[in-house]
Image: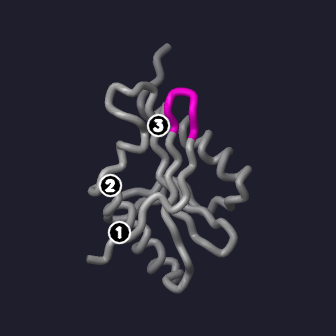
């Protein structure tokens, strides 16, 4: 039976969670929604709040998983992260954006995958 895209996404997030936990991340939220968009995983790594985007691709037909995160997606993630920090009164905390890319049989965790461009 063929898996739906949603089922594949859930399995990808489960794999990402497993890897992040092994790396010492403490999971705070999953699938956090704001008026600006969604963040797959919010975690703590030491004293840093980490906003994690998970992308999974089963083939390279449309590029690898990491190429699926364009500037528009990054802006939505950043706006959602800032919304979360303000709502949770965490604006003074250190934070970063990580990406977990899952391609066929490989998984990559990229820390500080992108930064906020304030211009």
Query: What secondary structure is marked by label 1?
Result: helix
Query: What secondary structure is marked by label 2?
Result: helix
Q: Residue at x 35, y 43 (%)?
A: 68
CA distance separating discs 3 and 1:
22 Å
**Image x and y of residue 73, in percent:** 32, 54
Query: What secondary structure is marked by label 3?
Result: strand
Q: Is residue 108 left or right of residue 76?
A: right
Q: Which stretch appears magenta? A: 102-107
Question: In what quadrant of the picture does the C terminus appear?
Answer: bottom left
Which residue matches tag 1?
Answer: 79
Q: Residue at x 55, y 78 (%)?
A: 94
**Image x and y of residue 104, in percent:** 51, 27
Q: Which residue of the protein is positioned furthest toward the bottom in this rendering?
A: 92
Q: Nearer the viewer, residue 88 or 53?
A: 53
Q: Residue at x 53, y 47 (%)?
A: 100
Which disc, if any, is residue 73? 2
Magenta-colored stretch includes residue 44? no
Looking at the picture, does residue 4 appear above or below residue 29?
A: above
Q: Is residue 98 left or right of residue 24?
A: left
Single out the mark in the foreground, 3 or 1.
3
Instruction: Name the N-terminal-most of marks 3 and 1.
Output: 3
Q: Nearer the viewer, residue 6 or 74?
A: 74
Q: Residues within 10 Å of mark 3 (few under 14, many from 20)?
A: many
Q: Residue at x 59, y 45 (%)?
A: 16
Which residue matches tag 3?
Answer: 56
Majority secondary structure of the magenta segment? strand
């Amino acid at each position: 039976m063929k898996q739906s895209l949603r089922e594949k996404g859930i399995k990808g997030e489960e794999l990402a969670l497993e890897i992040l936990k092994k790396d010492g991340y403490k999971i705070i939220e999953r699938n956090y929604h704001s008026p600006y968009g969604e963040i797959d995983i919010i975690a703590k790594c030491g004293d840093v709040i980490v906003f994690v985007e998970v992308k999974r691709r089963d083939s390279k037909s449309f590029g690898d998983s990491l190429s699926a995160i364009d500037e528009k997606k990054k802006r939505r993630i950043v706006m959602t992260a800032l919304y979360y920090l303000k709502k949770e009164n965490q604006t003074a905390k250190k934070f970063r954006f990580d990406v977990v890319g899952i391609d066929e049989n490989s998984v990559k965790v990229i820390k500080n995958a992108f930064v906020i461009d304030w211009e």
